[in-house]
Amino acid sequence: MNKFIPKETNYSIPVSYRKMENLHIVFWLLKDISWCMIWKPLGITMIFPTLIVSIIIAWRTRKIVSELCHNVAITVWIMANSYWMISEFFQFDSMLVWKDITYKHLAIIPFTIGIFLLAYYYIIWKPKHKNEFETM
């Protein structure tokens, strides 16, 4: 443990930020419930507030690399998830793009970006910055 950072360092989130994060969960759940229930208009509409709030959260945490990496990973997850939902809503999910790859499989691109971002953080960035404050 870094001798300059107390063992129990507190990370506090302003109430206004926390309220936005909690509202983000509501948007996300409404989007996914709409997907499950095949409520196309609500599902598609909920992509926008879910994604916008996710981007705002990532922007607000940009000075703490651990938070930024995880929040950007969440943002690309929402993008992948939203694309997948749209592909099912408009029934092009099972259409072939190339060989056995369907349009639904293209959601793997943003999912993979999120995984690579977190891998970068845990494998490269974090080990090189052991003395810096991080939440993870």
Image (cartoon, rainbow, N blue to C red):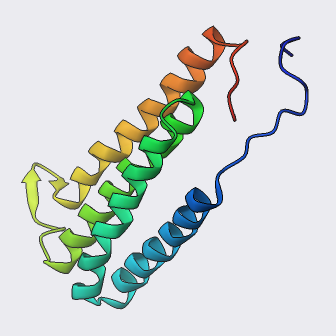
Please identify the quarter of the rendering in which residue 79 is found.
bottom left
| Closest to the observer, 23 or 92 | 23
Q: Residue, x 57% and y 68% (percent of image)?
A: 22
Above or below 84: residue 91 = below
- 13 vs 19, left or right, is right
| Residue 15 in picture, x, y percent from top left | 65, 60
Please identify the quarter of the rendering in which residue 28 is found.
bottom left
- Which quadrant does the C terminus fall into? top right
Please identify the quarter of the rendering in which residue 135 is found.
top right
- 28 vs 123, left or right, is left
- 108 vs 13, left or right, is left
Above or below 90: residue 13 = above
| Residue 125 in picture, x, y percent from top left | 55, 17
| Closest to the observer, 35 or 4 | 4
Q: Residue, x 68% and y 28% (percent of image)?
A: 134
Q: Residue, x 16% and y 59% (percent of image)?
A: 103
| Residue 89 in picture, x, y percent from top left | 20, 79
Picture mark count: 0
Can residue 103 be seen at all in this image of the molecule?
A: yes
- Which quadrant does the N terminus fall into? top right
Can residue 72 be seen at all in this image of the molecule?
A: no
| Residue 93 in picture, x, y percent from top left | 18, 68
| Closest to the observer, 30 or 101 | 30
| Closest to the observer, 85 or 79 | 79
